[in-house]
Amino acid sequence: MGFLVSPGVQVREIDLTNVVPAVSTSIGAIAGPFAKGPVSAVTAISSEEQLLQTFGKPNSSNFEWWFTAANFLQYGDALRVVRAESAILNAGANSGILIRDDDHYEASFSTGQGSHGEWAARTAGTHGNSLGVDICPSARAFSQQLGTLNLVDGAGAIGDTTITVDDQNATDATIAVGDIIQFYTASAIVATTNGAITTATKTLTVDTVTGTLAVGQRVLGAGISDGDEVVKIATVTSQTSLILDKAITVADNIPLVFSASGGHTKVESGNVEYEVTAEASDILTIRLLDDPGGAGLQTIIPDNSLIRRRWRFSDLFDAAPSTSDWSIANGRGELDELHVVVYDKTGDITGFDVDVKGQRTSSVIEVFPAMSKNSAAKTTQGGGNYYPDVIFRGSNYIYWTDHIAAGTNWGTDIATGTDYTLVTGVNSDTLTGGTDDYSVTAGEQELAYDKFGDAENIDVNLILGGPSSGVADTEAGQDTHVTMITDLCELRRDCVGFVSPYRGAVVGVTSSITQTENVKDAFDKCPSSSYMVFDSGYKYMYDKYNDVYRFVPLNGDTAGLCAYTDMVADPWFSPAGYNRGNVRSAIKLAYNPQKADRDILYKARINPVVDFPGQGVTLFGDKTALSKPSAFDRINVRRLFLVLEKAIATAAKFQLFEFNDEFTRAQFRNLVEPFLRDVQGRRGIFDFKVVADSTNNTGEVIDRNEFIGDIYIKPARSINFITLNFIAVRTGVAFSEVGG
């Protein structure tokens, strides 16, 4: 602010209301092999249901990781999950391909993948092999009264499950598996062309006619539109020479139908429809639509009956694809719309198989109507309507990876009067090539946990180790795994890691003495760190997703108890004991250490989890993995300092680039001291002192552009040992004589 030049009043504001902010303390983190979900990306999960929807169900290969995560979510509602990358692939239209997550897709696949095909499953895994995708790119593909080249060839009897057609693969449309068909007969005059007619003339010559041709009658036949562009008789020169109202092109000797109404009558009363289940050499296999008890034809189908076909998912849409309102209003190309349906091909996802009678509609997972082939298209609300972008924003199951081969000008912003490449048939893809791989290597597991390494951008507090042996159920495997978690926590220095012994140390071991030795030996070689917490084993719990009972590591629970403690008390309270340390969903323990066992474990930095009669399964220790005697060998003290350090460091950032003078130092003290008094009032510390003055901010410090604040903390200590002295006193002796 400049100086006043003439008399006046200058107003300035100085903000001294800054406070130390609240910081997160209960966000868990785990990395492991899951059935689906983003790969090598940090994903926020808030509930077991969301874990299930995002990363799939547990199975016999990954249940330890899955239930470690789920068990943590019993106590807290904030978990960050990374799916480890291994030999996994997304299912695709032509083959498998790895698309890790949305960022990977946008960087490498969003402009088309060439030979890969039209679609890829949204996440890697064999679950994607159950996906089917239909593109309906045109009105012809949507529904059509087939021309006379598709007459039924021969009579069909009641109960027949096959019919023979003249040409299943006609030029105007193709009858495909899944199509829904009805049968019609010609109810008007039938003739054939006598000589070709071209667009150069509207005159049509036909052979001998039985009946009377009249002005206004519709003309139907192969190559003549039966859609919006209706062709009619304009002039009857003679019963064999006609003038049409439109110039068309028709080959010689083509059967035609003339009628005021369109010339077709349904063979069967009502709306009897059939589904095409197979096709081979113009022989169609059919069944009564969506009727589990239905067989073949419900009535006799006369020879030369016509067929009306429609796309099997046409009833999910209000209209056939056409030209969008946006294209019309903005002078863009025509016939730009298409529909897309994502469905369950085998029933593995929804429980409904698209090819099973009565399950067609139930198998549908997602519907995307009236999207555009124009890369610049907009919806009526102004949002993008280009179909790859709509799919990317809206689908939970698929990515677009390329246009269908016939759509040569799709994705272009063409001018008015130009049609997008006409594709007359529905394009159906069954995705394939998706693979699972739950045997992650130690290196792959470490790369997954490394995603939590960025402390500035990834906020986590409690690192879950899952099965602590990692990929090898041995002491050596555990040592590698625990060292990896320890390195991560030591690198960040703002979180605590939780690990259990390797499975073989306690599960299936009948001797408690051997179990104690195994657990102690397993952790003996693990690094000393106040940022780590060891527990004693595995719990037995029910897996409702597979209807089995499983042994699951306890570190998800011990970390969860810290989150629970944060909710009911504060991070500087111990998560152990009968008040806050009760483990949930435990039927029994693989290893239930007795008092002598617990004495050995506690000396070895291991927190026993004990099943006490009448008290339940309880975390009965609050040690960190620090091997030397220190205040930081207790969980509550370590987490107290994490809270203080994180909160005060965040607040101290606002002192950056200020002057190192008494004003700034006083401001810092006034910021920190009220915060520490609050923590003291909430029983976190006994006493404190904040020093930020000239004694520690000397001239040399100032000249180095530094600021030093010394914060002395006397942490509160949890009670680990209770001594009760019961003293018998003679009746005649006063208590004052024997006690203080």
Image: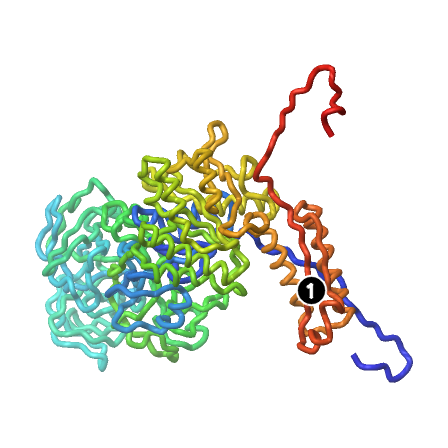
Q: Assign a secondary structure to mark 1.
A: loop
Of 36 and 413, the residue lying toward us: 36
From the top left corner, tell me how far across and down residue 360 is, in percent: 28, 49
Q: Quadrant of residue 191?
A: bottom left
From the top left corner, tell me how far across and down residue 413 is, in percent: 39, 78
Q: Is residue 652 visible?
A: yes
Q: Residue at x 39, y 37 (%)?
A: 591
From the top left corner, tell me how far across and down residue 126 is, in percent: 28, 55
Picture layout, residue 94 above or below residue 367 = below
Q: How many marks?
A: 1
The amino acid marked with disc number 1 is Gly
Of 506 and 385, the residue lying toward us: 506
Q: Quadrant of residue 675?
A: bottom right
**Residue ranking furthest to the right:** 7
Q: In screen coordinates, is 474 left or right of 632? A: left
Picture layout, residue 56 above or below residue 386 = above
Residue that carries the numbered disc 1 in the rendered image: 709
Colour mapping: rainbow
Q: Residue at x 37, y 61 (%)?
A: 39
Packing grade of label 1 (10 A; few <14, some 14-19, many >=20) is: some
Q: In screen coordinates, is 225 left or right of 657? A: left
Q: Residue at x 18, y 68 (%)?
A: 222
Of 364 and 196, the residue lying toward us: 364
**Residue ranking furthest to the left:** 154
From the top left corner, tell me how far across and down residue 225 is, in percent: 25, 68
Q: Quadrant of the N terminus?
A: bottom right
Of 431 and 10, the residue lying toward us: 10
